[in-house]
Image: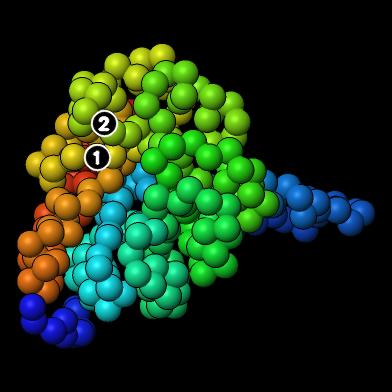
């Protein structure tokens, strides 16, 4: 095998109120700060919006921290704005910390989180969201104190509703390809239009538009962006190209969804 070479990737590309003196009140007006706080979205709501606006969550797993960081750089340069690093990646928290430092405005998170200890470590390193292949209530209970979005994996209507009633603001439909793909998402949206859903597992770049058109808030792309052969060959240019295609199609699908409302 060759040696991974780190390189620099290019960056991807209220009105004023006027009143006359006669309208000025004769006594001071007391303004409540709490009323302004209600207008400002919470960190969780901001992350939710970032995920919905991107249409794509890039899911990264690699066999070393160095490769993971370089692959992440390539994907971000390609236009990816929401990135999940899988727990099995060596040095996952160090990679997360470095990316948070470089891209503080991005929605960066950790995936396949199954233990509260790992959830806490990810939050301490700057994760804005956590994902699991199943619903882990202890993790949800923990993140509610830290303004971090938790996206649990669910499969059935009962699991979706249980996670939502427990406090989840978004769920991950997993494994979606094995359950019927975008047709399953379309079927689930009919009884649960109020629950944001992320589609995950086996999704290709050319099916992004169909999933979002059928009701998915976003899709998780793993091998579709971080191609296994490209990762093995340290072909980060290929990852950049795949990320560019995915980001473009995700943005176009989101814009079409907005036009439908």
Residue 111, position in %: x, y? 39, 53
Residue 87 lies, with reference to residue 100, above or below; the image says above
Q: CA distance from mark 2 to mark 1?
A: 6 Å
Asked whether residue 181 appears in the rendered view, the answer is yes
The residue lying at 21 percent from left, 70 percent from top is 71
The residue lying at 37 percent from left, 26 percent from top is 155
The residue lying at 28 percent from left, 33 percent from top is 175
Q: Secondary structure at mark 1?
A: loop
The residue lying at 34 percent from left, 37 percent from top is 198
Task: Looking at the picture, tell me which residue is in the foreground, 27 or 216.
Answer: 216
Q: Judge the density around disc 2: few (<14), some (14-19), many (≥20) Cα neighbours within 10 Å.
A: many
Residue 10 lies, with reference to residue 211, above or below; the image says below
Residue receiving disc 2: 176
Q: Judge the density around disc 1: few (<14), some (14-19), many (≥20) Cα neighbours within 10 Å.
A: some
Quadrant location of residue 75?
Answer: bottom left
Q: Are marks 2 and 1 in contact (CB under 8 Å)?
A: yes
Checking the image for residue 178, the label placed there is none
Quadrant location of residue 90?
Answer: bottom left
View extreme (front): residue: 1
Task: Looking at the picture, tell me which residue is in the foreground, 199 or 15.
Answer: 199
Residue receiving disc 1: 201
Going from N to C along the chain, the mark reached first, 2 or 1, is 2
Residue 167, position in %: x, y? 59, 34
Residue 93, position in %: x, y? 44, 70
């Amino acid at each position: 095998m060759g040696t991974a070479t780190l390189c620099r990737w290019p960056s991807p590309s209220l009105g004023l109120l006027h009143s006359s003196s006669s309208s000025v009140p004769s006594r001071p007006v007391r303004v409540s700060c709490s009323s302004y706080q209600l207008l400002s979205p919470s960190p969780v709501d901001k992350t939710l919006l970032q995920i919905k606006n991107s249409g794509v969550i890039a899911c990264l797993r690699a066999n070393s921290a160095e490769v993971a960081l370089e692959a992440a750089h390539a994907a971000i340069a390609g236009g990816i704005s929401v990135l999940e690093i899988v727990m099995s990646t060596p040095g996952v928290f160090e990679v997360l910390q470095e990316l948070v430092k470089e891209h503080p405005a991005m929605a960066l998170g950790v995936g396949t989180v199954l233990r509260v200890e790992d959830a806490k470590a990810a939050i301490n390193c700057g994760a804005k969201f956590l994902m699991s292949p199943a619903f882990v209530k202890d993790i949800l209970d923990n993140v509610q104190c830290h303004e971090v979005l938790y996206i649990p994996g669910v499969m059935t209507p009962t699991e979706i509703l249980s996670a939502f009633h427990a406090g989840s603001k978004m769920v991950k439909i997993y494994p979606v390809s094995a359950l019927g793909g975008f047709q399953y998402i379309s079927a689930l949206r009919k009884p649960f239009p109020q629950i944001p859903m992320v589609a995950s597992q086996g999704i290709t770049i050319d099916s992004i538009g169909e999933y979002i058109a059928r009701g998915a808030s976003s899709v998780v792309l793993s091998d579709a962006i971080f191609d296994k052969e490209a990762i093995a060959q340290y072909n980060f240019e290929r990852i950049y190209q795949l990320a560019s295609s995915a980001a473009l199609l995700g943005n176009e699908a989101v814009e079409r969804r907005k036009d439908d409302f």
